[in-house]
Every structure is written in structure tokens, then in C-alpha cells.
Image (spheres, coloured by chain):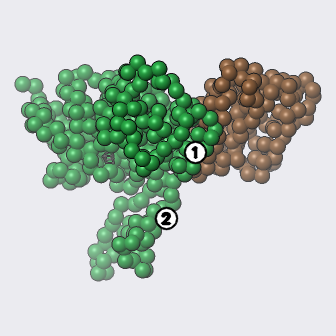
Amino acid sequence: MADKVKVGFLLLGGCAGCEMSVVDLSEKLVDALAHLEVVFWAPTAADVKYNDLEAMEDGFIDVAFVDGMVRLDEHIHMAKVMRKKAKTLIAFGVCAALGGTAGMSSLHSKEDLFAKAFKNTPTTDNPDGVYPQPSCLVDGKYDLTLPVYEDKVRTLNQIVDVDYYIGGCPPHHSHVGAAIGALLSGQMPPKGSWITNGKAVCDVCDRNPAKKGDNLSRAMVTKVLRTVDGTPDTDICLLQQGYICFGPITQGDCGGSCLNVNIPCRGCGGPIPGIEDYGAQALSSIASILKDDTVSAQLMEKYPNLAKFFYRYALPSGTLPKRM
Amino acid sequence: MEFVPNIIGFACQWCTYAGADLAGNLRCKYPPTVKLIKVPCSGRVKPEYVMEALANGADGVLVGGCHFGDCHYKDGNHKTKNRMDMLKVMLGDLGFDPRRFRREWISGAEGKKFAEVITDFTAELIELGPNPLKGGK
Ligand code: SF4
Ligand code: SF4
Ligand code: SF4
């Protein structure tokens, strides 16, 4: 048998949910391990340290899965190290690909974020406002350091070259399985592409009016509801009921997970091909199907921050936000 | 050196672009601050175009379309209104000064209005100063 494919996992600024999706493959993962050898998995699953990665030969890892966004100097450093050690590097999950939900924090100053996290939450008792510092001397002799907090969230491809992208927060485990299958069989799309089934969420959604031959399918949206406003009908397209859904512009590798539990798509799958700027396109697509300006006024009243609404998972990748 | 704003204008070929032409024919005076891009319809202007222009250092962006009822494609400008008005709000939510973006209805007969809009926008941009992202990428 040919040599096993050497894979590595590296978590940057994320929640490790993407890695849970790998674990969720369960028996399939066990089968795949006949062809894969995990040579690095930190800082979560394996008992390895960052300097073990640094010590590897360049190009030693065949495929690296990097999840999480980039906010600390440590993330920047480790992303660069992983890029050198890996022949193929995958931005794994929407945080790495587009910045993820944490990307919205770029709209707030570091001072505000630190005050919220380390001082003002109801369960925090920190009257002196002591914040984590990049370095501190303990007992006059231990020089301890913490990673430096950068000014904003960045996507992985703003730091290093990325070969492939996988969407999702986290990616659905079936999607991860399909991606690993594609890797092992060598059936990969051109470099720089998203690994996807190529369908929009609407394509995989059972509510899609076009699938029902419904002539309302081109009807304009006449009112805007938030998910807390009543309970949506479980059979009818959410957009047509007034619940703003990003299914039309989002990759549907999740199988429409949110629609299956009666909540609208918020775009974690990443943009369908051809869309450069997720938030700008979301605004454009949604604005175009609102019947008139009273409906758009209603949307703006219900969603008081449009940047956070349309760029929920993608702010750091936006044309304008990434330059700000 | 005195700051001369750089405005990128997207103008519908049926109305605002013709309005700009008329401003010229009427010899209206207005500052030479706008670089006009002719588009088939203001509904053709994607929010990305506006954001790209601002991201690359334009001091202001103008989208000009036909008055309601006059759209050559019936409802292109209704889409423009919804999109561009929401975009203006989103620019503010992103922390970018929304006054750097304007959406105006200017017909082919309103050469004078075109000149007034550019004069007024230029004055406002001079007050705001250069785009903080000047220099682009
Ligand atoms: S994409 Fe979602 S699941 Fe993955 S690290 Fe980011 S927040 Fe967690
Ligand atoms: S807009 Fe949402 S609810 Fe409607 S078909 Fe698409 S994914 Fe389904
Ligand atoms: S429906 Fe949309 S938000 Fe929900 S999991 Fe799928 S892509 Fe993500």
C-alpha cells in the first residue's frame, strides 16, 4: 500500500467546533485512518506542542486543516509555520475562510472588547481593571508572556496562501467526510477553490417554492420578521414568510441544517461561486426582493446593525472592512 | 496643497449621464471632481462597486439614476433605492462616514441639478477631508 497521507490540524482563533466535526465522522474517521496519518493536532487533540511543528521538515505534512480566525500574533506565527510545513493548506470552516462570527469584533475597539470581557460582565469581579498583558514578571523572576492581541480579525488568506476553502460553522460532518474522500481520491477542484457540492442552500431546501411548482416563487417580500416574531410555518419558504434567509447566496453543503430546524440561513456555508464579497451581495440580494422602501425601512428597524447582519460570518473578508 | 476631492460617479445612461451632458451644453459651472462611469441602469450598480471605490481611496461615490416612473427598465431604480439606501446605513455601521456616499435622482433634463449636486457634494467632501483609506490596498 502507498504511504499514508500525512495530515495536520491547527486551531487558531476558533472554538474547535470544526475539529469536532472531524471527530463526528466517528466510524468513517476510523476507516479513513487506514489511509491517513495524523502527524499534528494542536492545541486541542494531540499531545504535541507548537515547537514539534516547527521542528518538522518543510513540506512534511501533506494536508493541513487550519481552523479559526487570526487575531493574535501567535496565530500569525503559527499560520506561517504551518504554511511552510504543509504541501496543501485548507482554510477549514468559515472562521479561517472568511473570519467567522468573531470577525464582527473588528467593529469594536480593543479597549471596549477588553472592558467587556475582563471587567464589565456581571460575573466578573475586577474593580482595578486588571487586563491580560503581553508580558509580566511574576515573583520578580518569572518572565511570563501572552500572545499580543492584534487590532482586528483577519482571515487565513490575509496571512498565508490558502489552497482550498471549506465553509460551515462548523462544516457539516458529511461535508468533512466528502472533503476527505475527495482528498484521498485526488478528485480535487483547482487550487484556490472552495470544496463544495456546488449547490446553494435553497437548492437543498425542501421549502424552495420552485421545487413545488409554486407560482409565488417570484413574489416580493412584503414584511420583515425576526425569528422571535411568532413561529414560522415549517413548509413554506422563510423568505416568503418575511423571515430573512440567506439561502439563495450561500453554499448548501450543510444540507440546509438551519431550515430543517425552522430557522433561516445566516450564511455560514460561505458564498456561492462568483460572489466576491458576501455581505455586499447579501445586502444586494435581500434589498432587491423587498417590495418597497417601507419594507426596507422595516428591515433596518428590526436589524439595527446591518454590517453585523449581512456580514455575520464574513466581515473580515469584505472589500471595505478588510481595508479599514 | 489644497484638497481636491475625488468622486466616482455611476450614472445611468438614460438620465443622469444625459443630465451631465446637458450640464456641459448649458455651460453650467461645477468643480472638476467627478469621474463619471456610464452604466446601463442605476440598478446595475452593485454595492460592491461602491465599496471597492471607497476601499481604493475615492473620497466620495455618487450613484445617479432616473426619477421613479422614468426607469427605462421599469423598476431598476426601485431596486437601486432599496439597495443604496441600505448600503448607506451599512457603511455607517461599518464605521465609515456614510456622507461619502450619495444616491441621487437626476433626469436627462436636469443639467443644472447635476451641477448643483456635484458642487454641493464636493463642498461636503472638502469639509470631511480625504478618505481615511486613501492609498487603497
Ligand atoms: S467556524 Fe464555527 S465551529 Fe469552526 S472554529 Fe469557527 S466558530 Fe468554531
Ligand atoms: S430562501 Fe431559505 S427558506 Fe426559502 S428556499 Fe431558500 S433556503 Fe429555503
Ligand atoms: S443553513 Fe446556512 S447558516 Fe445554517 S448551517 Fe447551512 S449554511 Fe450555515
Q: Chain of mark 2?
A: A
| Left or right for A72, reference A244 | left
At 42% across and 72% down in the image, what residue appears? A119
At 73% across and 50% down in the image, what residue appears? B129
Do the residues bearing badges 1 and 2 touch, measured as CB atoms within 8 Å? no
Instruction: Specify which label sits upstream in the sequence, 1 or 2.
Output: 2
Q: Which chain is assigned green? A: A
Q: Residue at the left extreme?
A: A1
Point out the image quarter for the N terminus of chain A. Answer: top left
Q: Residue B33: image x %, image y %?
A: 79, 37
Q: Which chain is assigned brown? A: B
Q: Residue B64: image x %, image y %?
A: 73, 31
Q: Are marks 1 and 2 on the same chain?
A: yes
Nearest the viewer among A126 and B78 is: B78
In the image, is residue A7 above or below residue A121?
Answer: above
At 40% across and 66% down in the image, what residue appears? A117
Nearest the viewer among A152 and B115 is: B115
Nearest the viewer among B20 and A159 is: B20
Q: Secondary structure at mark 2?
A: helix
As drawn, the label of residue A298 is: 1
Q: Residue A241: image x %, image y %?
A: 46, 36
**Residue B6 position by quadrant:** top right
Mark 2 lies on residue: A112
Amino acid found under the numbered disc labelled 2: Asp
Q: Secondary structure at mark 1?
A: helix
